[in-house]
Structures are given as C-alpha cells and as structure tokens.
Amino acid sequence: MQLEILREERKKWLTWKNIKPYQEAIAALPKFDDITCILGDKVEIQISNLSDTNRQQIEETARLMKPWRKGPFQINTLCIDSEWQSQIKYNLLERHFDLKDKIVGDIGCNNGYYLFRMLTHQPKKLIGFDPSAIYYSQFQFMNHFIKTDIVYELLGVEHVEFYEHKFDVLFCLGVLYHRSDPVAMLKSLFKGLHKGGELILDTFMIDGEDEICLTPRDRYSKIPNIYFVPTVNALKNWCYRAGFEYVEVLETMVTESNEQRKTEWIDTQSLEDYLDPEDKTKTVEGYPAPKRVYIKAIKGK
C-alpha cells in the first residue's frame, strides 16, 4: 500500500467546503510566545497578556469546530467542556502502561487529547491515526498553542500494518465495535506491533461467561455502526485468533453520565438520550446499557 499517495489524496480533504473554514481560522490565529501548558486531567494552556480581541478569536475558532467529543481543554478562561470526560479513561489506563522512549500509536485518536497527555511519559515518538478532517482540525487548533512534534495521520486502523515502522505500544480506544470484522482489525494491529509489543484496547462488552457476542439488528445506543458487542471471553478469543499470546483484563466499567454527557460543545444527543428513560440499565433498543472492558494484549517475542 502506497501511503504517500494516500496521504496526498487525504490532504485534499482539508479543502472541502465544510472543512476549509476551520483551516482558514487556524491559519489566522496569532502566534504567542509566552505560553504555559499543563498536561493534566484538563489539557490547559495559559497565554500571558492575552488581549480581548485574541481571546474572542480563539473562542470563535474553537466553537466553529464543534462537536468536541474528547477533552476537556482549557485556554486561559475558555473551557472546552467536551462530551467525554476523557481523563476518567486515561487515568484508569495510565497505571498500566510504560511509554518512556517507546514508539507509540493511538488509533482513532480523535482530537489528540490522549496523545497530549502521553507527552508527560516521554515517548520516543507519538503518532495518531484518525481519518477525520474535523478532528484533525481540532488537533491542529490545540497544537497551535502546545507546539508538539506529534504526528497526526489521516489514516485508519487498516493502514497500521503497512506503516513505515512498527510500534512498541498501540492504543485503540473505542474503535473495535465500529468494525464489521473485529478479528481482521485485531490482526492489523498485531502486524503493526514489534515483537513483545503491547496493545491497549477498550470496547463495549456484555456480561456473561459464554464465548458469545451481541449482534445488534440495526442500532445500539442509537449508533448504526455497532456490529458486535462481545463477552470478555469472546473478546479474548478474538485477540488469540489475531495472534496475541497474552491477554490481560485491566478493568470493566459501566459508562455513566459523569463520563459522557451533553454539553454546549457538542449540540447533539449524548448518553442520557441513548438509554431507556424507564430503565437506565438498557439502551433505547432494549439491549444492555453500554459497559466497557479494557484489556492489554501482548505480541509474543
């Protein structure tokens, strides 16, 4: 697969009529020299002596690029209160990984919230994959201030195995259930890892000891592209079939409204709209409410 040709083709996405205004707004942002970045639960940027005009320009640019799914971010007094309180997932996973001096990829990286957080672990290289020009624009907006050397590829999980180099650690958070062939996706991730490399993954799950999965007829939590929701044992089997030698369950957790909720930064429905109003343990379709399993899968040496 010739990735350079694909990259050039996807750069053209940034000229689409719905994306071009984002790119123009980012290009028009002033440059600031005196910036302090705090890469904590809230990715925070403090700009010294920010004028009212520049403050307004920054806010208008941020609001232009809604919806903001991952975060939160803050620029001086402007809080981008994203739909997902992504620090909950990140803090849950952080104690389970070591990224120092490693080549790290984040598949489905969205606007780069997790990548920005990972900088504190001093990885050798950080690469995000996400074929969304909107999320890429949000990343560019934040990186205008943070000024990192993170590489953002407008590529998907299917391109990882063909990438120019292998990875020591791959994160794939909230992607697997969107794929109609989850084992094929896991094989692609497996091929993208060095020997001994680690995959950190989360996906929807259903309870039960059987090696089975839920296959929604039409939608799951109003989402049309949810294909399979496995039990933990079924997910383990998928990983083993993909070639992974060792699978560790890190955590299971029900998605709650303190983690995912509607804010002024998305203008669309969120978790509370996806659940049965009479029984919050079920989706509006009658399936078990969203619950996630977090795993670490290791490629043998």
Image: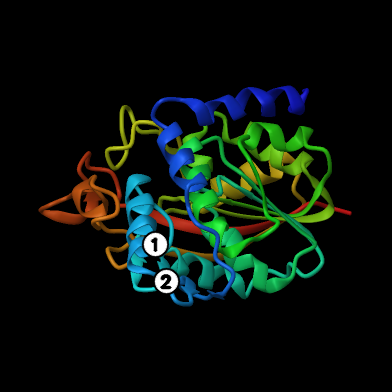
Q: Position of residue 126 (x, y in %)?
A: 71, 56
Q: Is 12 located above or below residue 259 in the figure?
A: above
Q: Is 288 located above or below residue 263 in the figure?
A: above
Look at label 2 and name its amino acid.
Answer: Leu
Q: Visible in this render: residue 294?
A: no
Say which of 98 and 240 sits in front: 98
Look at label 1 and name its amino acid.
Answer: Asn
- Quadrant where the C terminus sits is bottom right
Question: Number of callouts in the render?
Answer: 2
Indicate the secondary structure of the residue bearing disc 2. loop
Crowd rating for badge 2 (residues with CA inside 10 Å; few <14, some 14–19, many 20+): few
Residue depicted at 22% across the width and 42% down the height: 286
Q: Can you name the residue that lies furthest to the left here?
A: 278
Q: Which residue is the site of mark 1?
A: 54
Q: Position of residue 119 (x, y in %)?
A: 66, 67
Q: Is 41 located above or below residue 248 in the figure?
A: below
Q: Is 3 located above or below residue 75 in the figure?
A: above
- Quadrant where the N terminus sits is top right
Residue depicted at 68% across the width and 25% down the height: 8
- Location of residue 64 by image quarter: top left
**Distance from Cα at disc 1 to Cα at disc 2:** 6 Å
Q: Position of residue 206 (x, y in %)?
A: 41, 50
Residue depicted at 10% across the width and 53% down the height: 278
- Location of residue 163 by image quarter: top right
Residue depicted at 63% across the width and 37% down the height: 157
Mark number displayed over residue 50: 2
Q: Are marks 1 and 2 in contact (CB under 8 Å)?
A: yes
Looking at the image, residue 67 sits to the left or right of residue 110; the answer is left
Indicate the secondary structure of the residue bearing disc 1. helix
